[in-house]
Amino acid sequence: MSIIVHSGDMDKLYSALILATGALAMGMEASLFFTFWGLVRLKKGGLERGGLSRMNMLGLGRWMMRRRMKRANVASLERLLKDFKELGGKIIACDMTMEIMGIKMEDLREDLITDCGAVGTYLEEAKQSRINLFI
Amino acid sequence: MGVIKVDCVNETCPIPLVETRKALRKAQPGDIVEVRGTHAASKKEIPMAVKALGLEVLSIEQAGEVWTIRIRK
């Protein structure tokens, strides 16, 4: 499975990470290509800062969602990413996004990132995958 | 051959599946992984994952809210 993580919205990151860790748990391989607003979330301290893709209401929606998620005992994005790595998942950071947004490797969570790459790196992953998503 | 216990009571999607996979990776062939949980969908999905991994579910039990799935590696 390969997923392009384009959005930095909290709810979309959850969708991507639940799918990706689920795929690994089912014995599949998985790689995540972080680009644009998705990559911004991989900056140090940036992971949990995304708003909701809808009804964010200046952060109120996000606050309510977090409260409900806590009550339902939903895992943090940090835990899901750690599990993803532990189960052998690959994380690729988009080169071009780093260049145009002025993000350096040392600004990013180097503990999580497997590799930097461009469109060719993603396509190499995607052509071997039966499930390719853009989130 | 040992028994590895995984407690996923009150955990929700996708943690029971992920913790089961983590335990199965660490287990030696012949070991038994015993997962307990309360997340209803995982009771169906863990056996699906076990099948996809080519392993065997030994038993699935339900006691009140808590289910227990035993898997042989």
Image: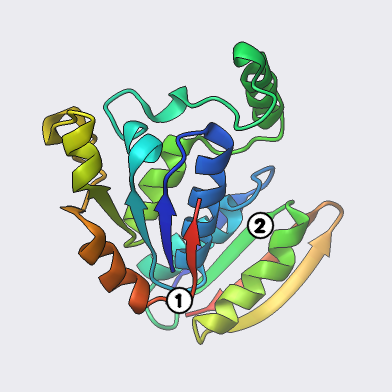
For label 1, the residue is: B31
**Total marks placed:** 2
Amino acid type at image mark 1: Asp
Give the residue type at disc 2: Arg
Give the mark toward the camera: 2 or 1: 2
Q: Which image quadrant is residue A62 in?
A: top right
* Residue occupied by mark 2: B36
Relative to residue B54, is residue A96 depicted above or below?
above
**In the rendered structure, the residue with mark 2 lies on which chain?**
B
Marking on residue B71: none
* A33 relative position to A75: left or right: left
Q: Quadrant of residue B57?
A: bottom right
B9, A29: nearer the viewer: A29
- Classed neighbour count for the residue bearing mark 1: other residues with Cα under 10 Å, few (<14), some (14–19), many (≥20): some
Pick the front one: A39 or A108: A39
Image location (x, y in percent) of residue A14: 54, 43
Chain letter behind tag 1: B
